[in-house]
Image (cartoon, rainbow, N blue to C red):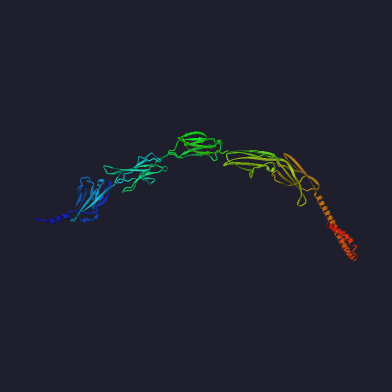
Amino acid sequence: MHLLSASCVCALLLATLPRQVSSLETVIGLYGETLEIPCNNGAINAKEIMMTKWKYDKGEGLTGDLLVKKNTVSISADDEYKGRVSIAENSSLLLSAAKLTDQRTFTCMVVAGADITEYPVNVVIYKTPAGLEISGKAEDLEIGKLTKLGECVAKDSNPAANITWRKNNTPLVADGKGISIQATVAVDPVTGLSTTSSMLKYSAKKEDAGAEFTCSTQHAVGKELVSSPATFTITYSTETIVLQVTASDPLVEGESVSLKCMADGNPAPTAFNFYLKGELVKVENTNTYTITNVSRNSTGEYKCSLADDPTMKASQNITVSYLDINLSPSGSIVKKAGEAVDLTLQIDASGDVKVSWTKDNVKLNKKPKFTTLTYADSGRYECEVKVGLLSRKDFLDLAVKGAPVIRQLTKLRGENGKHKVLICEVEGSPKPAVSWSINGTSLAESPFVDGKITHKITVVPTANLSVSCSVSNELGADSMTINVSSLNEEVRMDKQDQSDDNDQTKLVVGVVVGLLVATIVIGLAYWVYMKKSKQGSWKTGEKEDGSSEEEKKLEEKVDETSQKAEV
């Protein structure tokens, strides 16, 4: 028997102790699923591995064996892992139906040649929440009052879920005033899974009506979970009230008008008071009151209020438009020319009026006046009065009539000188009938306008005669006579007039020539006389005064003769 030295024994023991990898790997598994725990991650050539052994940490320094793989696999687990463990081709440990109690360290021991190496692996088990929903929801939310909105629950997760509340997808953060969030976590004693509950208390605002509230959580594994949205009725007391008037425009007598009292409270009030010009009417389960068959006396201020708070009021003014006109005279009337008509238009209206006039559909610039009627005043006169969109019309059909009067009877010689044209100008209404005392050819009759008509005939008189134009209508008659000479007589008279004109011309020429000759003779005599007088004055100066007087007389005669010659 050979004895080994102490140093050899120590070396042998040191050589057989397993060498542990310094780093600790962590593997995450999902609750209820099969977890693969790797061994050495290929650090050792599989052909060199003589034996692989899996064990786990039981706590308190104790370990438990799971299985050994040498030539064959020998499973030694006899506790909670019985029937749950197996080994893969790459020596990884396969652990089925992962539980939270599997969160511990599993160690893979590998024998390769003279080396024994251990690979510890830390296992963590995650589980996403089974669901996310809002429960215990409030029936409604009151403005300004911190009210429990609901509770969001994330069931059976690991680790415990963190819940976030959102309004219209915007995260809510507790502020100690209008938002309060309280979260609690409960752990299932059997499974170890956590259930997180988050309660939201919220002080609503008016604009929260229709807002969507949700809760969500983002787990370490898996996608984000979001609850179904929840909406709430926001309740608040009435702050403003409005009276709405529904009526035609313009609102006229005999129609209906609807009054609607609208309050902004929620829920909406169901009872209202209507103040109808001093009369109080209370309605329930409606906010509308209808006034039928309105009249001009219905114009005024109308109010409504909450039945339980009469101080909360609203008002509106209602105007019933009306327009009454009275045209006098109106309709169809007949007047005589020269008379006067006092045309008056009386208006009773609910506002400022606009008046327009037309005559035979032609616009007039002002109201017509009839102080002295003429035939031109006949026609249809219409007045239109407007108040806003309301209008009224009336008319006067004025017919000015009178017995016919011949204003002028004239005669003209035709252009060729072989006939004469007689013109009879008549005024009267109804249209007068025109007749002549002789037969002639009718040239034309003018249109009957403004009570006037002109009638022309052509005649060829062979002798001097008197011609009458007679006119008549239902109101009277008139006639006028004109003398018409024959065409032959007019020719003779024209020749006589020409002869007389020639004789007169000859007489005037003779007188003028005689006067000119007389002027020349007198001038010549005066010249001779003056010459002799100057010769005598050289001999004696005693006769100067006498000769001067004679010279003056002679000059006066010459001037007189010159004036006659000019005439």
As rendered, which of 56 and 111 lies closer to the eye?
56
Q: Note whether 87 is above or below 402 in the view shown.
A: below
From the viewer's perspective, is 473 left or right of 204? Answer: right
Q: Note whether 147 is above or below 74 in the view shown.
A: above
Q: Note whether 11 is above or below 290 in the view shown.
A: below
Could you tell me residue 280's position as x and y percent?
50, 33
The answer to whether any part of residue 99 appears in the image is no
As rendered, which of 321 and 132 lies closer to the eye?
321
From the viewer's perspective, is 53 left or right of 507? Answer: left
From the viewer's perspective, is 493 left or right of 304? Answer: right
Q: Give the quarter of the figure containing the N terminus.
A: bottom left
As rendered, which of 543 and 137 lies closer to the eye?
543
Could you tell me residue 538's position as x and y percent?
89, 66
Q: Quadrant of residue 2?
A: bottom left
Q: Quadrant of residue 474?
A: top right
- The residue lying furthest to the front in this view is 542
The answer to whether any part of residue 397 appears in the image is yes
Could you tell me residue 105's position as x and y percent?
23, 49
As rendered, which of 359 and 325 lies closer to the eye?
325
How many numbered circles does the render carry? 0
Q: Give the quarter of the figure containing the C terminus.
A: bottom right
Could you tell me residue 348's position as x and y percent?
60, 38
> Which residue appears at 73% of the width and 44% of the height?
426
Q: Note whether 478 is above or below 279 in the view shown.
A: below
- The residue lying furthest to the left in this view is 1
From the viewer's perspective, is 278 left or right of 64? Answer: right
